[in-house]
Amino acid sequence: MRLSKIDPNSFSNPEDVVIKHIDLIWNVNFDKKTLSGVATIHFDILAQSIEKILLDVSDLSIESVNVKSAKNEIPIDFEITDHVENIGSKLTLFLPTQTSGKLIVIIKYETSASASGLLWLASEQTCGKKHPYLFSQCQAIHARSILPCQDTPAVKFTYNSVLYHPAELTGLMSAIRTKNLPGESHFEQTVPIPSYLLAIVVGAIVSRDIGPISSVWAEQEQIEESAEEFSQTNDFLKKAEEICGPYVWKRYDLLILPPSFPFGGMENPCLTFITPTCLAGDKSLANVVAHEISHSWTGNLVTNQNFEHFWLNEGFTIFVEQKILGRLNGPAFRDFHALHGLSELTDCIKVQLANEPELTKLVVDLTNLGPDDAFSTVPYIKGSTFLRYLEQKFGGPEVFEAFLRSYLNKFKFQSILTDSFKSYLYEYFNKEPKYEQILASIDWDKWLFSEGMPPIIPDYDHSLVDACKRHADLWADNNLDTIKASSVIQEKLLSVQVIEFLALLLEKKTIVDLNGEKLSFLVKTYKLNETKNSEIRFRLVRLYIKARLFGKMTEILQFLNSNFRLKFVRPIYKELGQWPEAKPLAIENFAKYKIEMMAVCVNGISKDLGL
Ligand SMILES: CC/C=C\C/C=C\C[C@@H](O)/C=C/C=C/C=C\[C@@H](O)CCCC(=O)O
Ligand SMILES: [Zn+2]
């Protein structure tokens, strides 16, 4: 079912009425695990007149709804209907009369203790063990579990908020903090945002400055290593501005979350959320920050109108992220990241999406499908590969970056579909006859709607990836004696190259003598026991599973329970589920730890384990 015309996953009707601004008052109650308070929603009515407003809600208790006029507040009727599992329900507000122009609605409500967009951690689940912790993750459609809204990226609004929270804790939001009193924090977001960018954190967190407009926030125990790990933040920001144009969000702070945070990072405006699994100790995973910074333009300024066109957010963001990395470390590094992305895509298509090939299309159909169930690396990598292909076609970075800036400027503050990007590309390049042939040669259908790997792989510099290939071939095709005698293992690899080498090894159909002895030598050769790099540990654990090393189960579970980032835990649970001897243990382990996971993680793993 498509829930509405504009967005298959939202009940709202933004063609008639749109939210322009929300004033929020939230009481943060750690005992009840609820946010309770008031949302004062300012609407612009686009239709001639309307008699009802449709909003998205999930698990909210609505106490009252009032319409505000110049003189008074009038209570109005409302109903909650059409519940769809893992999506939410329709909240209909019945207006007292046919209404046009502007309208203010005041909704008093409370969230549920199991709101899918929030995670309430007990003190013992934090680093410091002394204070509880709350954080949110609204993308894609979980904002509806924390406030009634048009939970579609088609609508953008500004917001002001007041948080009341325990005085010993700090509260932050995806906005600029305007007032900070013990137990009371005020915020304003003056740039219009889609609902999925609404974010909150409340915890015992402290900050360190890491740049002219940047601080990093973390629990005291992780603050120093976080400041060091992400010290390149301002360099990334400067390069991003060179590529994309002026930064409009005033501040760019980072928040390093507890390990239950389900994603690598989340581009919440003014305050990017980052998983602690990026604390590698050698900045080798700091590209996640370059990625989230890039979203300040691609995604947060120019936004996909619904999640079927998610590649407009993520494909563009990976494209800009890799440009930043290339500018700072050289073009070979940019291409290394692009090729590594293609390895990840190969793995995703083979493992995660083996039975869902329709989700390997760049533009997907989300009729009857929640975005969380469609999420994969496809929009990221196929999308960025498409843009790289276009860049090469139109003559390289100089030409294409001028187009990119023009595109971002044209569509900033808007939400668009793929067609708007396509039309603008034609409008922009059609000005010069030399581009006519090139425009005519783009096979849009193939790029947007064909399944599997990208139809064309652009030309890349393979120099950094060649070493990874040599190592992967050596380990896959030879027995231990030959490996020990080979000069290849004397070659030093960067951390990012070790990640790619292990990824390529995992891709191999057969690995000669894949056993404990061989993997012990692999661990020793690349000093994998000493690494904190989660991307490396993730792939080592998958090699243990591939080798069916039951004796390594403690190590496998230790990694599995050290963080609940979907990218890591879902493939591991899925592969354990396909190993009959290990499956019962995996199910038992999941039952024990799911209390520390967000709903998106619990739902995903349940699916992977066939529960
Ligand atoms: C075609 C897919 C359609 C919609 C998916 C949209 C959102 C899905 C939802 O599950 C939320 C995703 C949030 C992602 C946030 C950050 C990512 O960039 C992290 C990528 C994975 C990682 O590094 O952990
Ligand atoms: Zn992203």
Image (cartoon, rainbow, N blue to C red):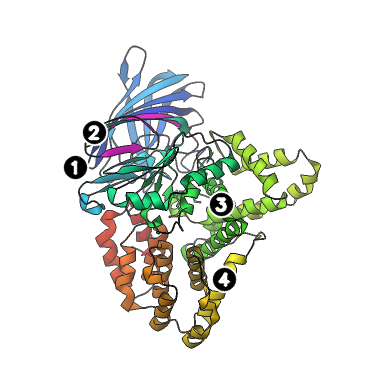
Q: Amino acid at mark 1?
A: Asp
Residue nearer the viewer, 438 or 558: 558
Span colored in magenta: 153-182
| Three-letter code for the amino acid on which mark 3 is drawn | Leu
Residue tagged by mark 2? 183
Closer-to-camera residue (410/581):
410
Q: Which residue is mark 3?
A: 328
Q: Secondary structure at mark 1?
A: loop
* Residue 581 seen anywhere in this rendered image of the structure: no
Question: Mark 3, residues whose alpha carbon is within 10 Å: few (<14), some, or many (≥20)?
Answer: some
Q: Is mark 4 within 8 Å of ligand 1?
A: no
- Look at discs 4 and 2 and give the one toward the viewer: 4
Which mark lies nearer to you, 3 or 2? 3
Q: Which mark is first along the chain, 4 or 1?
A: 1
Q: Secondary structure at mark 2?
A: loop
- Amino acid type of the residue tagged 2 in the rendering: Gly
Q: Nearer the viewer, mark 4 or mark 3?
A: 3
Q: Which residue is mark 1?
A: 31
Q: Distance of mark 1 from mark 2, alpha carbons?
A: 16 Å
Q: Is residue 394 magenta?
A: no
Tag shown at residue 467 = 4
Question: Badges 4 and 3: C-beta atoms under 8 Å apart?
Answer: no
Residue 396, image x, y percentages: 70, 50
Which secondary structure, mark 4? helix
